[in-house]
Image (spheres, grey):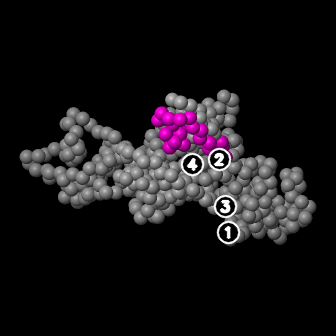
């Protein structure tokens, strides 16, 4: 099978590619951060590359979007051009992803803090002939659970428990989420309890680490949503999942990788460990929530635009590959209906829509736009 050598500039990446491969497919396989607003259909004309020393013959979309001078200079649309020779490919500035800027200052509400996650430091009596209860019940007893009560726990926690208790001389901090034990930590760590809140936007993803003891925001980080390589808008991304067998999986992997990058940066800025983050909450439009969870968004592209679920979703961090504490909880807020997602719900909650008061209107101006009006009660 004939292969050609390709050099991408300004990244300086080299690879060998078989004849007939689309340039955009090579770009995506190398992980080069680019945007394709129309999802590679040739309609937007934004994925312009310059090919040297000689470019393949232009196609109809090339002639539609590029001038004769551009064509003579080796300009082509990457999503329409197949590799048929050795090439040096210069990616245009229009195609490169731009850095995002986010607003991190504003009016803060005074809230009463009541986190789902809590910590309790306990000094457990060591086992003896007079006290032979199991390690797990020793922890339950310290948390005031009755013997017949059984809080939830994961098997991997049980596997860690004996060594943690004995290496810490049975002086440990127990981390719980509602009636579920998610961690037992050596010594007293009750002063360190963190969560992170995410807004998964179609264009930009933002994460904020919150001190769950005080309710204060302590660190922010953001990234461009790299799903943009499959299209700038939600419909293009849904279309990509319909037309490509691995489209949904790749879309989910993209957004989860972005989220993990944000977690790492925000934790570093806050000078905390990522496994000290025990909960993450997520809002986003309906499509973004589906793609993050790996839910098939096909029905969202057809009237009457029915989502897989409108309910809030809880899952363990390790089950989604999100790099906070592996047994930490991920909570995706409920979508409202159709394309009106949990991001609008988040705005309504932040603006006290559940409290009685004067009429008020919230406007979300994004890739998707929504209005939320509250009248009287």
Viewer-nearest residue: 369 or 144? 369
Q: Which residue is mark 1?
A: 11
Q: Is residue 322 visible?
A: no
Q: In what element is the residue under mark 2?
A: loop
- Marks 4 and 1, how far apart in space? 27 Å
> Which mark lies nearer to you, 3 or 2?
2
Name the mark nearer the viewer: 3 or 1: 3
Q: Tell which circle, 4 or 1, labels the residue nearer the N-terminal end.
A: 1
First in sequence: mark 3 vs mark 4: 3
Q: Secondary structure at mark 4?
A: strand
Left or right of residue 2: residue 370: left
Dot 4 or dot 2, earlier in sequence:
4
230 or 219, which lies in front? 219
Which labelled disc corresponds to residue 366?
Answer: 2
Residue 361 is covered by the magenta coloring: yes
Q: Are marks 2 and 1 in contact (CB under 8 Å)?
A: no
Report the side of 4 relative to 72 (left or right): left
Residue beneath label 4, please? Answer: 200
């Amino acid at each position: 099978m004939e292969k050609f050598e390709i050099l991408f500039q300004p990244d300086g990446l080299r690879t060998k590619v078989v004849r007939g491969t689309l340039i955009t497919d090579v770009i995506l396989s190398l992980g080069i951060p680019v945007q394709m607003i129309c999802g590679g259909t040739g309609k937007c004309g934004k994925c312009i590359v310059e090919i040297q020393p000689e470019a393949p013959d232009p196609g109809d979309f090339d002639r539609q979007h590029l001038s004769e001078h551009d064509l003579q200079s080796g300009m082509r649309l990457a999503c329409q051009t197949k590799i048929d020779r050795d090439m040096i490919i210069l990616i245009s500035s229009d195609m490169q992803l731009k850095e995002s800027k986010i607003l991190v200052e504003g009016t803060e509400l005074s809230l009463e803090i009541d986190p789902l996650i809590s910590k309790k430091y306990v000094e457990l009596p060591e086992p003896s002939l007079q006290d032979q209860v199991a390690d797990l019940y020793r922890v339950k007893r310290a948390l005031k659970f009755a013997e017949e009560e059984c809080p939830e726990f994961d098997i991997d926690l049980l596997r860690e428990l004996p060594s943690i208790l004995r290496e810490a001389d049975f002086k440990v901090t127990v981390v719980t989420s509602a009636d579920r034990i998610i961690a037992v930590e050596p010594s007293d760590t009750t002063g360190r309890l963190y969560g992170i809140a995410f807004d998964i936007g179609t264009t930009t993803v933002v994460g904020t680490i919150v001190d769950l003891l005080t309710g204060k925001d302590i660190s922010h980080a953001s990234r461009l949503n790299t799903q943009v390589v499959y299209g700038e808008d939600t419909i293009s991304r849904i279309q990509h999942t319909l037309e490509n067998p691995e489209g949904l999986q790749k879309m989910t992997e993209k957004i989860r990788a972005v989220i993990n990058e944000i977690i790492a940066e925000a934790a570093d800025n806050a000078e905390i460990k990522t496994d000290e983050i025990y909960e993450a909450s997520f809002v986003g439009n309906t499509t973004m929530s589906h793609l993050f969870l790996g839910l098939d968004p096909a029905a969202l592209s057809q009237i009457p635009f029915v989502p897989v679920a409108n309910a809030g979703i809880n899952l363990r961090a390790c089950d989604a590959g999100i790099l906070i504490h592996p047994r930490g909880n991920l909570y995706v807020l409920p979508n409202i209906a159709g394309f009106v997602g949990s991001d609008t719900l988040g705005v309504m909650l932040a603006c006290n829509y559940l409290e009685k008061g004067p009429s008020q209107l919230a406007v979300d101006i994004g890739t998707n736009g929504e209005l939320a009006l509250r009248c009287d009660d």
